[in-house]
Image (tube, rainbow, N blue to C red):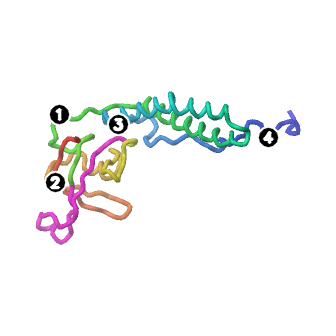
Amino acid sequence: MSRAFVDEDAGADETDGMHEIPLPIPPGARNYMTPEGALLMAEELRRLAEEERPRAAGALAAAEQAAKAEFLRRISTIDRRITYLTRMKAALSVVEPPANADRVVFGLVVRVGEERDRVREQGELGQGSTVDYRIVGADESDPGRGYVSWASPIAKALIGKRVGEAATVRLPIGEQRLRVLGIRFAE
Protein backbone atom coordinates (compact mmCIF):
# COMPACT_ATOMS: atom_id res chain seq x y z
CA MET A 1 0.00 0.00 0.00
CA SER A 2 1.26 3.45 -0.82
CA ARG A 3 2.27 5.60 2.17
CA ALA A 4 0.11 8.37 0.67
CA PHE A 5 -3.02 6.58 1.84
CA VAL A 6 -1.86 5.85 5.39
CA ASP A 7 -2.84 8.15 8.23
CA GLU A 8 0.43 8.27 10.14
CA ASP A 9 -1.30 9.79 13.16
CA ALA A 10 -3.87 6.97 13.34
CA GLY A 11 -3.61 5.30 16.71
CA ALA A 12 -1.33 8.01 18.06
CA ASP A 13 -2.56 9.39 21.31
CA GLU A 14 -1.27 10.79 24.54
CA THR A 15 0.04 7.39 25.63
CA ASP A 16 2.51 6.95 22.77
CA GLY A 17 6.05 6.80 23.98
CA MET A 18 5.13 5.15 27.29
CA HIS A 19 7.15 1.99 27.58
CA GLU A 20 6.96 -1.01 29.87
CA ILE A 21 8.43 -0.49 33.31
CA PRO A 22 11.68 -2.51 33.32
CA LEU A 23 11.92 -5.27 35.89
CA PRO A 24 14.58 -4.73 38.59
CA ILE A 25 15.58 -8.40 38.42
CA PRO A 26 17.57 -10.22 35.72
CA PRO A 27 15.57 -12.19 33.12
CA GLY A 28 14.59 -15.58 34.52
CA ALA A 29 15.43 -14.60 38.11
CA ARG A 30 13.01 -15.04 40.96
CA ASN A 31 11.41 -12.02 42.62
CA TYR A 32 12.26 -12.71 46.26
CA MET A 33 10.04 -10.89 48.76
CA THR A 34 9.23 -10.97 52.43
CA PRO A 35 5.70 -12.13 53.32
CA GLU A 36 4.80 -8.51 54.18
CA GLY A 37 6.11 -7.26 50.84
CA ALA A 38 4.15 -9.89 48.93
CA LEU A 39 0.95 -8.87 50.71
CA LEU A 40 1.55 -5.19 49.95
CA MET A 41 2.20 -5.98 46.28
CA ALA A 42 -0.98 -8.08 46.02
CA GLU A 43 -3.00 -5.32 47.68
CA GLU A 44 -1.62 -2.66 45.33
CA LEU A 45 -2.39 -4.83 42.30
CA ARG A 46 -5.94 -5.45 43.53
CA ARG A 47 -6.52 -1.75 44.28
CA LEU A 48 -5.25 -0.66 40.87
CA ALA A 49 -7.26 -3.25 38.92
CA GLU A 50 -10.48 -3.15 40.93
CA GLU A 51 -10.68 0.47 42.08
CA GLU A 52 -8.37 2.96 40.36
CA ARG A 53 -8.60 1.74 36.77
CA PRO A 54 -12.42 1.49 36.72
CA ARG A 55 -12.64 4.92 38.36
CA ALA A 56 -10.29 6.42 35.75
CA ALA A 57 -12.16 4.71 32.89
CA GLY A 58 -15.45 6.12 34.21
CA ALA A 59 -13.95 9.59 34.41
CA LEU A 60 -12.68 9.24 30.83
CA ALA A 61 -16.12 8.26 29.56
CA ALA A 62 -17.71 11.27 31.26
CA ALA A 63 -14.97 13.75 30.32
CA GLU A 64 -15.24 16.53 27.79
CA GLN A 65 -13.20 15.96 24.65
CA ALA A 66 -10.57 18.53 25.70
CA ALA A 67 -9.90 16.69 29.00
CA LYS A 68 -9.74 13.15 27.58
CA ALA A 69 -5.97 13.24 26.98
CA GLU A 70 -5.31 13.65 30.70
CA PHE A 71 -7.52 10.67 31.58
CA LEU A 72 -5.92 8.55 28.83
CA ARG A 73 -2.48 9.27 30.33
CA ARG A 74 -3.77 8.32 33.79
CA ILE A 75 -5.22 5.03 32.50
CA SER A 76 -2.01 4.28 30.63
CA THR A 77 0.04 4.90 33.79
CA ILE A 78 -2.24 2.60 35.79
CA ASP A 79 -2.06 -0.08 33.07
CA ARG A 80 1.75 0.11 33.02
CA ARG A 81 1.87 -0.39 36.79
CA ILE A 82 -0.62 -3.29 36.61
CA THR A 83 1.48 -4.95 33.90
CA TYR A 84 4.66 -4.45 35.92
CA LEU A 85 3.13 -5.86 39.12
CA THR A 86 1.65 -8.81 37.23
CA ARG A 87 5.06 -9.65 35.74
CA MET A 88 6.75 -9.34 39.15
CA LYS A 89 4.04 -11.50 40.73
CA ALA A 90 4.64 -14.20 38.10
CA ALA A 91 8.27 -14.43 39.27
CA LEU A 92 7.41 -14.14 42.98
CA SER A 93 9.09 -16.31 45.62
CA VAL A 94 8.06 -15.49 49.17
CA VAL A 95 10.93 -16.03 51.60
CA GLU A 96 9.75 -16.96 55.07
CA PRO A 97 11.76 -15.72 58.06
CA PRO A 98 14.64 -18.00 59.06
CA ALA A 99 14.51 -20.18 62.15
CA ASN A 100 17.25 -18.20 63.90
CA ALA A 101 19.18 -14.97 63.58
CA ASP A 102 22.74 -16.21 63.92
CA ARG A 103 23.78 -15.11 60.41
CA VAL A 104 22.70 -12.25 58.16
CA VAL A 105 20.09 -13.56 55.72
CA PHE A 106 17.15 -12.29 53.68
CA GLY A 107 14.44 -10.69 55.80
CA LEU A 108 16.53 -10.06 58.91
CA VAL A 109 17.66 -6.71 60.29
CA VAL A 110 21.40 -6.22 60.71
CA ARG A 111 23.00 -3.42 62.72
CA VAL A 112 26.36 -2.38 61.35
CA GLY A 113 28.99 0.13 62.30
CA GLU A 114 31.55 1.71 60.04
CA GLU A 115 35.12 0.88 60.93
CA ARG A 116 37.65 3.69 60.94
CA ASP A 117 41.05 3.07 59.38
CA ARG A 118 43.00 4.29 62.41
CA VAL A 119 41.47 1.72 64.75
CA ARG A 120 41.08 -1.13 62.27
CA GLU A 121 44.51 -2.49 63.15
CA GLN A 122 43.46 -2.68 66.81
CA GLY A 123 40.35 -4.67 65.91
CA GLU A 124 38.05 -2.10 67.52
CA LEU A 125 35.15 -0.25 66.05
CA GLY A 126 35.78 3.44 65.47
CA GLN A 127 33.43 6.25 66.33
CA GLY A 128 31.50 5.83 63.06
CA SER A 129 27.75 5.80 63.10
CA THR A 130 25.63 2.68 63.33
CA VAL A 131 22.93 1.83 60.81
CA ASP A 132 20.23 -0.82 60.71
CA TYR A 133 19.55 -2.51 57.36
CA ARG A 134 16.80 -4.97 56.56
CA ILE A 135 17.53 -7.18 53.58
CA VAL A 136 14.42 -7.34 51.41
CA GLY A 137 13.22 -7.84 47.84
CA ALA A 138 13.92 -5.42 45.00
CA ASP A 139 10.43 -3.86 45.12
CA GLU A 140 10.56 -3.54 48.91
CA SER A 141 13.79 -1.56 48.87
CA ASP A 142 13.52 1.78 50.67
CA PRO A 143 16.94 3.14 51.65
CA GLY A 144 15.36 5.89 53.75
CA ARG A 145 13.90 3.22 56.02
CA GLY A 146 17.04 1.07 55.90
CA TYR A 147 15.44 -1.52 53.59
CA VAL A 148 18.04 -2.68 51.06
CA SER A 149 17.54 -5.09 48.18
CA TRP A 150 19.18 -8.49 48.47
CA ALA A 151 20.93 -7.64 45.18
CA SER A 152 22.47 -4.40 46.50
CA PRO A 153 26.22 -4.21 47.20
CA ILE A 154 25.55 -3.72 50.94
CA ALA A 155 23.33 -6.80 51.23
CA LYS A 156 25.67 -8.94 49.12
CA ALA A 157 28.59 -8.01 51.37
CA LEU A 158 26.67 -8.68 54.60
CA ILE A 159 24.78 -11.89 53.77
CA GLY A 160 26.28 -14.84 55.63
CA LYS A 161 28.15 -12.73 58.20
CA ARG A 162 27.84 -13.26 61.96
CA VAL A 163 27.97 -10.73 64.79
CA GLY A 164 31.51 -9.39 65.09
CA GLU A 165 32.49 -10.15 61.51
CA ALA A 166 33.38 -7.39 59.07
CA ALA A 167 32.44 -6.90 55.44
CA THR A 168 33.93 -4.67 52.77
CA VAL A 169 31.30 -2.97 50.62
CA ARG A 170 32.29 -1.58 47.24
CA LEU A 171 30.16 1.50 46.56
CA PRO A 172 30.40 4.21 43.89
CA ILE A 173 31.85 6.52 46.56
CA GLY A 174 34.55 3.98 47.40
CA GLU A 175 35.04 1.03 49.69
CA GLN A 176 33.45 1.01 53.12
CA ARG A 177 34.23 -1.50 55.85
CA LEU A 178 31.28 -2.45 58.04
CA ARG A 179 31.25 -4.57 61.18
CA VAL A 180 28.14 -6.55 62.13
CA LEU A 181 27.06 -5.38 65.59
CA GLY A 182 23.75 -7.24 65.83
CA ILE A 183 21.24 -9.35 63.92
CA ARG A 184 17.56 -9.55 64.74
CA PHE A 185 14.15 -10.42 63.36
CA ALA A 186 12.08 -7.62 61.86
CA GLU A 187 9.24 -6.34 64.00
Q: CA distance from mark 4 to mark 2?
A: 63 Å
Which numbered disc flags the more N-terminal residue, 3 or 4? 4
Q: Determine the residue located farthest toward the bottom in the rendered image.
A: 118
Q: Which mark is residue 37?
A: 3
In the figure, residue 69 lies in which quadrant? top right
Boundaries of the magenta span = 112-137
> Which amino acid does the dot numbered 1 rest on?
Ala
The residue depicted at 68 percent of the width and 39 percent of the height is: 68
Q: CA distance from mark 2 to mark 3?
A: 26 Å
Which numbered disc flags the more N-terminal residue, 2 or 1? 1
Secondary structure found at label 3: helix
Labels 3, 4: front one: 3
Instruction: Name the residue carrying label 4.
Output: 8
Horizontal and vertical percent position of residue 98: 21, 35
Q: Which mark is residue 99?
A: 1
Q: In the rendered view of the protein, which quadrant contains the N terminus?
A: top right
Q: Which mark is residue 133?
A: none
Q: CA distance from mark 3 to mark 4?
A: 44 Å
The residue depicted at 38 percent of the width and 43 percent of the height is: 138
Secondary structure found at label 2: strand
In the figure, residue 67 lies in which quadrant? top right
Please, is residue 137 above or below residue 170 in the view? Answer: above
Instruction: Name the residue carrying label 2.
Output: 181
Secondary structure found at label 4: loop
> Which amino acid does the dot numbered 3 rest on?
Gly
